[in-house]
Amino acid sequence: MVIFMTSKKQFHALDSFKMASSFFVIAIHTSPLSSISADADFVLTRVAARTAVPFFLMVTGYFTVSPFLFSRPRDYSPAVMFLKKAFLLYVMSVIIYLPVNIYAGHFRGITAGKLFRIVLFDGTFYHLWYLPASILGLLIILLMSRRLPFPAIVLVSLLLYLTGLFGDSYWGLIENLPHIRIVYERFFQLFSYTRNGIFYVPIFLVMGALLSRTRLCPKMTALTGLLISSVFMIVEGLTLHAFQMQRHDSMYLALLPCMFFLFQYILSVKARPAAHLRIQSTWIYLIHPLMILLVRGIAKFTGLTSLFVDNSVIHFILVCMFSYLFAVIITYFHNNKPDPDSGKERAWIELNRENLRKNLTEIKNLLPAGCELMPAIKADAYGHGAVLIAKELNACKIKSFCVASVQEAVSLRKNGIKGEILILGYTHPEQFHLLKKYRLIQTVVDYPYAQTLNAYGEKIKVHLKIDTGMHRLGIRSEKIHEICTIFELEHLVVEGIYTHLCASDVLYDIDQNFTFSQSEMFYNVLSQLKERGYARPKTHLQASYGIFNYPELSGDYARVGIALYGVLSNRTDIRDCPTALYPILSVKARVACVKDLYQGEAAGYGLAYVADRNRKTAVLSIGYADGIPRILSKGIGQVLLNGKKAPIIGNICMDQTLIDVTHIPDTKQGDIAVILGKSGSLEISVYDIAEQAGTITNEILSRMGSRLQRIVV
């Protein structure tokens, strides 16, 4: 369920199994095999499906209990966030099911004691017990953590579970013991079942927390343990059922080892990112009783009760289909709901989705057969916003990316970006664990670094960087022995090899000769590897300029960078570009206030601007901290306002910029000024700003401030 996940970690198999568990819950409430075999239905719904709720609880423990049990200082924020979300979800669910409860007469003649039991323990509808139980169970663990060490918490939680067991599946063992039965009957005056937040929940929260810090067995051991414990649980459930010992059927002895091994096995399974399943599984859980009522209502209205309800398999399938459909619709609106703060920013960047896709198409058409794009989204995607750009590219089926640092790569993974992510730069050995944790590919920057990576002792995917003349990162191309030795290192998985063409943006003879020399050195390394019997990994040497100027140089990937964003480094290059490119970024800021400046008065830092006559000025909510070059001060730069040019006056400040709007008399507070982009028939391009600042477009774009919100339009 979505409320049990944090944004800090992505464990995709957990998301997938949460969806499966939500359908298990539907099975519990619809008995899909009852019209075929009562015994088979019992095994499915009263034994196998009983893993669903403990799984949800273990995920909660994994992400919210672990930080305050094991971290120093203790981090209570995930637990507090969970409690708030679970409480709000419970309140919302109570409201949703209130009309059904009133219609069914569930609240007729209700006493204060019964209301207390329903709200705190049983839930106001048959499936809602889980929400107050998870809240209460987490509060119990929080209280114990203040006084008890972790082993004692485990012991107390286990004793609580065993106590609850005799009020559930093992009721038959104590129902004829008068003194013990009296104790349990007193319990049942407070709550209907021991499957609640006191007896049932704590042990699974603790197990989840434990497995967040310690993997106790490898994948195959976990699978074997799961199979054996599952058999024991089935035998246990059938035996208890046959002897009619169960008061309820949620708690089994074998459920504990079964969940212990199941959770470890799921953690070991590789799965694609599927964050949307978190929200969908939550809504399936919440709304499936309504879908049961809907299916039965449709069956009664159409006269197809015998088919839609009496046939338990079809009934189950229909309820699952309707529940999933509604969950997908709700998820869609949840993901696409308008941002309440959208359009209220002081300054922001707009990204044109259509232009990005046009650039993708244009560049793909230039690639040789078999060559895929590996977009460079380093430096926050050249200032455009790496996560937003990567998500758009993922949607366009781009599955390979390259970045400059491990921090950039981790940020992408945390935000659900799929595919391969290559780190082009150096990663410190103390951060090697992040390479494994987030499934990243590291560049081997030289031979000693390869040895350092190998000494880490775990398999790490790498690409070899070959220095063919730029003399920056990489192993010199003539050092074939070192390159070959890296292929022999035990813990390095060499998946790629590449070089960087450092003069491919210039077409003078000397630069062309140098570029061809670089490519020859690189291809020679590949030939040497083949001659010595090494399998050739994926190759890449092309970047934006190489794609345009040297299309004959092929590889498995092309590391397109600046061109992807519809820009080249300078105006001359874009004029000579063999294909159309479409800029995707605009920068805008709001007018904070409009002021009169009288003749002879000065404005801004250093009194850099003095009015030669009475003038009207406007203050824009953007400055050099947002990436506007300070060199554009004192009339060098300009902005667009209401379709007209307005010069920048005085010195650009950290957070504000002064402009002259004397000739735009209708200027008012809240108006939008265009710093980079179009307004009416006018445009300020990144080439204009780069030329005024005496630099290249790459620098202007990549220095756009992080506090500028990025919006895809």
Image: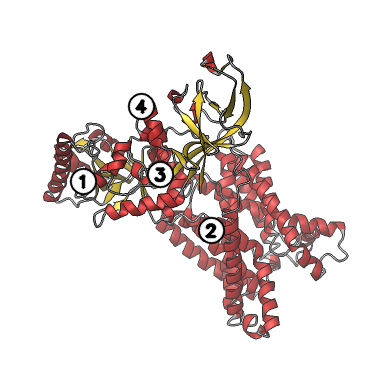
For mark 3, does the 10 Å Cα neighbourhood hold few (<14), some (14 to 19), or many (20 or more) residues?
A: many
Camera-side mark, 4 or 2: 4
Mark 4 to mark 2 CA distance (whole Å): 49 Å
Residue at x 48%, y 64% (from the top left corner): 228
Q: Is residue 237 visible in this depiction of the protein?
A: no
Q: Quadrant of residue 563?
A: top left
Residue where numbered disc 4 is placed? 694
Specify the amino acid type for callout 4.
Answer: Gly
CB under 8 Å between discs 2 and 1: no
Mark 3 to mark 1 CA distance (whole Å): 23 Å
Camera-side mark, 4 or 1: 4
Q: Is residue 133 left or right of residue 65?
A: right
Sequence order check, earlier mark of 4 and 2: 2
Q: Is residue 18 visible in this depiction of the protein?
A: yes
CB under 8 Å between discs 4 and 2: no
Specify the amino acid type for callout 2.
Answer: Leu
Which disc number belongs to residue 550? 1
The kind of secondary structure element at disc 3 is loop
Sequence order check, earlier mark of 2 and 1: 2
Mark 4 to mark 1 CA distance (whole Å): 28 Å
Residue where numbered disc 2 is placed? 277
Which disc number belongs to residue 583? 3
Residue at x 51%, y 63% (from the top left corner): 229
Specify the amino acid type for callout 1.
Answer: Tyr
